[in-house]
Amino acid sequence: MVKPVVVRNLHGQVVQELGRLIVGGEIAPGENLPREELLAERMKVSRTALREAMKVLSAKGLIESKQKTGTRVRDTLHWNQLDADVLAWRCASMPTEDFVEKLAEMREVIEPAAAAAAARRRSAEQLAAIEGAYEAMAAANGREEWSVADLAFHEAILHATHNELMISLFSVVETALGSYLALSARKAIDFKYSLPHHKKVLDAIRRRQPEVARAAMQKTVSDSRSNIRRHTKKT
Amino acid sequence: MVKPVVVRNLHGQVVQELGRLIVGGEIAPGENLPREELLAERMKVSRTALREAMKVLSAKGLIESKQKTGTRVRDTLHWNQLDADVLAWRCASMPTEDFVEKLAEMREVIEPAAAAAAARRRSAEQLAAIEGAYEAMAAANGREEWSVADLAFHEAILHATHNELMISLFSVVETALGSYLALSARKAIDFKYSLPHHKKVLDAIRRRQPEVARAAMQKTVSDSRSNIRRHTKKT
DNA sequence: CTGGAATGAATTTGTAATACTTTATAGCAG
DNA sequence: CTGCTATAAAGTATTACAAATTCATTCCAG
């Protein structure tokens, strides 16, 4: 569930290792990392494997290689913040509430807009999918079960937008938030407290009322956000 | 300005070439591409160069390599839609108005939210930057000059949000939209028609009125969108 | 005839050695 | 002091080969 991205490839491990180091700030932007030969030796891999890893990191905008100059870490401005790996590394290295805030803000931006778009463009099947997820939420027995259905609900709405950019953005943000959402799960007693909110969203989408859907989703999601905030503050 | 991404590296060229092929749909998802040796030969590069390219593509989620099975194109669902390269390839391959719509929709989601956040959190310097960009817009002499200032204005607002995820998203979407925006530039006569809208946004941010800023930006950006739509329809 | 284990072959993964290309820098000439 | 040139350092690229994985086939037992 938390995406245990088991990397089987050797170069994949190198990517993970270096990525964590860089995003974690152990190697500051502007700084050069050791030259290929040394680094390869130090990491116990061949130079070729290291190069493959560096190509990946450079595709994510983290590093930049030039001949003679060496390889250096690029400024945070350039790196691909929306890449799933980069996000994961940030989550791992800086679990500050500040970052969670930013993620939550993104979610709060996307989801109401998505709900509105879904209300405009959903097909009959997609509405059925959303309804199905809602039923599952209503019927959920435990917190675990409820979370799964909840995620399915939001995903179904995203798909109904017919905009794969939005879907992609959502899924990236959501998996990054995932761990924190789990942490901040409410007490078992009232884990269904937001069901009525979801109902409103569903109804608005069914009736094709974009603005109503937007408002309802806004409420749902900002509620969940303040909830997260309360929890992270507490820790 | 339009990011002429000159790739000097050999493997970079291979990445571009294969990326275009895949995103352009010439190699359908689920399909296997020729095995490394053949492909390398066909592209006139060494296997190593090809492999480095494949690692990059697989980091972008486009392909998946397994031993014995070969390398196959992954389903569109998995690929990293928000990657700058992927987006660029899509722009190059499917310049349908449909895709422009999606990009514009993203923009319409981000910018109002960003304006609101900026109104809440902007520092004095950031406000000054926004004002500076606005002055430049007002003083612009030609369409070209105006576009530059316009972009600076929106960028300054994004930076004032203090949310690098949003900044990153914006810059990706914006560069992808860039070419189309240039295409849909209005007649030279009234290229400043949206200046009043921008003024309202600026004022709201200065006075720290999030909701006002949001509404004003909403108007600005939806206006520009319908403008784009009109133009792409025409072609 | 069916099902499961052993075998073999195809293909990616990983390593190593070597030659090339670019470019920063130092040193020399003017 | 300026500007050219030589050099060496670093990434770039190619080749060849060893290893691991897994799919497909075959063969034997039930």
Image: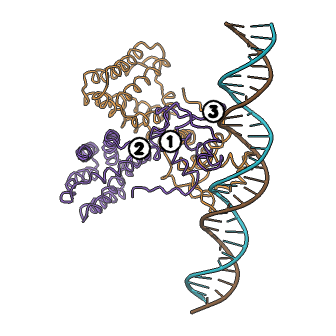
Chain colours: A purple, B orange, C cyan, D brown
Other residues around mark 2 within 10 Å, as few (<14) / some (14–19) / many (≥20): some
Q: Could you tell me which quadrant the N terminus of chain A lies in? A: bottom left
Can residue B29 be seen in this snapshot? yes
Q: Nearer the viewer, mark 3 or mark 1?
A: 3
In depth, the one of A27 and B50 nearer the eye is A27
Residue at left offset 31%, top offset 59%: A149
What amino acid is labelled 1 in the image? Asp
Same subunit, labels 3 and 1: the answer reads no
Residue occupying the point 55% across, 29% down: B2
Disc assigned to residue A33: none
For the residues labelled 1 and 2, say whether their Cβ atoms are less than 8 Å apart.
no
SS at mark 3?
strand
**Is the C-beta separation of discs 3 and 1 under 8 Å?**
no
Residue that badge 1 annotates: B83
In the rendered structure, the answer to whether residue A50 lies left or right of residue D6 reads left
The answer to whether residue B24 is seen in the rendering is no
Three-letter code for the amino acid on which mark 2 is drawn = Ser
- Residue pictured at 44% horizontal, 25% vertical: B151
Q: Which residue is mark 2?
A: A93
Alpha carbon distance from label 1 to label 2? 23 Å
Task: Give how far across and how far down residue A102 sits, in percent.
Answer: 34, 39
Along the line of sight, which residue is nearer the eye, A98 or B52?
A98
The chain holding disc 3 is A
| Closest to the observer, B185 or A30 | A30
The verdict on a common chain for dots 2 and 3 is yes
Query: Would residue A207 appear left or right of A45 to someone viewing this image?
Result: left
Q: Nearer the viewer, residue A34 or A18?
A: A34
Q: Residue at x 18, y 59 (%)?
A: A189
* Image height of C4 relative to B114, above or below: below
